[in-house]
Image: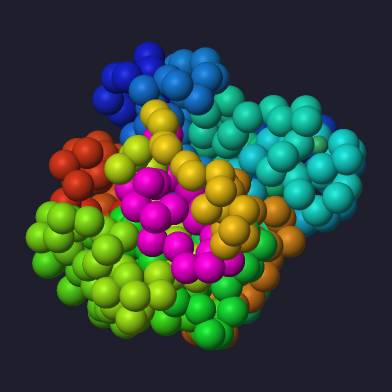
Amino acid sequence: MVVKEWGQPFTLEERPDPQPGPGEALMKVRAAGVGLTLVTMRTGIFGGEAPRIMGHELGGDIVAVGDGVTNIRPGDRCAVYFYLNCGHCRWCHGGRETLCENHGGYVGVHVDGGYADYVVLPAGNFLPIPEGLDYEGAAIAADAVNTNWHCMRERAKISPHDDVLLIGAAGGVGVHGIQVAKAFGARVIAADISDEKLEFAKKWGADEVINVRAVNDIAEAAKNLTDGKGVDAAVDYVGSSETFTAAIEALATAGRAVLIGAKPSSVQIDPLNLLIHEKTITGSRHSTRTELMETMEVMARGTIKSAIGKRVHFTEVETLFDELQAETLLGRGALTYDD
Ligand SMILES: [Zn+2]
């Protein structure tokens, strides 16, 4: 499924099977995830050149490797790591590889991804899937879940006595955020835009819910649900000025507001309030390879499950984009492939 020019819909093309060059591997794709990030990417604002085969949340089987590849072999079940990092800068060495100073872009944007039967990538971007986790779970692990694993542990610093507000909790990343925050022991307050979405959030573990369209003020509603204290962490998956402002205003003393989604144009902050209450405002960027491996291991144990709202054949990926744009998809979209 090819995007011929950024901003255009997908078109089905027949191409010869790709072959792995030195240091690369070829994977038969078995499952893929579809989320809102891809809708944004397809506008072209992440850069990269079209025509492009998109798709970065992938699970499949390695079928061939190029010269010099030692980390994987044909027959290995693998997930795909989504960032093209250099592997040798201070951030790559220091365990914060998503901050790579020689960042080469993203699978499915700067190189062809996996909305196709086969995908070729640098061998280091393939990570083995642990036993007990299916291809679809592994695909979703590689963005919708591991992004939360990094966020909750490293940025929001969740611990079991925390109240955590998730804004946009029923979306593809948010619904896994509920599960990850619960796995770290938090009490989860889910905010989203409809009762249907909030029912879905509850089904996946949310303790309390806030219907954003039924309350005047998300921060005030969160305070009401915490006896006036506020939340210890607030994660904003939506990323509008309004939602990130609410995340900051909902914080308790020593609270952490974390931006995951999109691009708030501006927010007002009160520096003295940050100082006096030692609050933190920060962002969270995807996950490292190590965190992806940990995420897959936790999913293999069944602690966190892939929450799929709709599943279609990969040649029908456009229908999932339509639902994502209409904000009607609950959880993650998934793609199936022929054997
Ligand atoms: Zn680097």
97 and 165: which is toward the camera: 165
Q: Residue 300: give x, y in percent of width and height.
A: 56, 79
Vertical position of residue 183 compared to residue 23: above or below: below
Q: Residue at x 75, y 45 (%)?
A: 97
Q: Residue 258: give x, y in percent of width and height.
A: 51, 53
68 and 248: which is toward the camera: 248
Q: Please check the rendered image and state whether residue 263 is part of the magenta-colored stretch, yes or no.
A: yes
Vertical position of residue 68 compared to residue 2: above or below: below
Q: Residue at x 57, y 53 (%)?
A: 274
Q: Is residue 10 visible?
A: yes
Quarter of the image that includes the C terminus: bottom left
Q: Please check the rendered image and state whether residue 94 is part of the magenta-colored stretch, yes or no.
A: no
State the extent of the magenta-drawn residues as a range: 243-264
100 and 49: which is toward the camera: 100
29 and 3: which is toward the camera: 3
Q: Quadrant of ligand 1?
A: top right
Vertical position of residue 100 compared to residue 145: above or below: above
Determine the image quadrant of residue 266.
top left
**Coloring basis for residues:** rainbow
Q: Residue 102: give x, y in percent of width and height.
A: 78, 28
Quarter of the image that includes the N terminus: top left
Q: Residue at x 39, y 29 (%)?
A: 265
The answer to whether 7 appears left or right of 82 in the picture is left
Q: Is residue 59 visible?
A: no
Vertical position of residue 318 compared to residue 332: above or below: above
Q: Residue 116: give x, y in percent of width and height.
A: 44, 39
The answer to whether 158 appears left or right of 33 in the picture is right
Q: Residue at x 31, y 68 (%)?
A: 222
Q: How many numbered marks appear? A: 0
Determine the image quadrant of residue 320.
top left
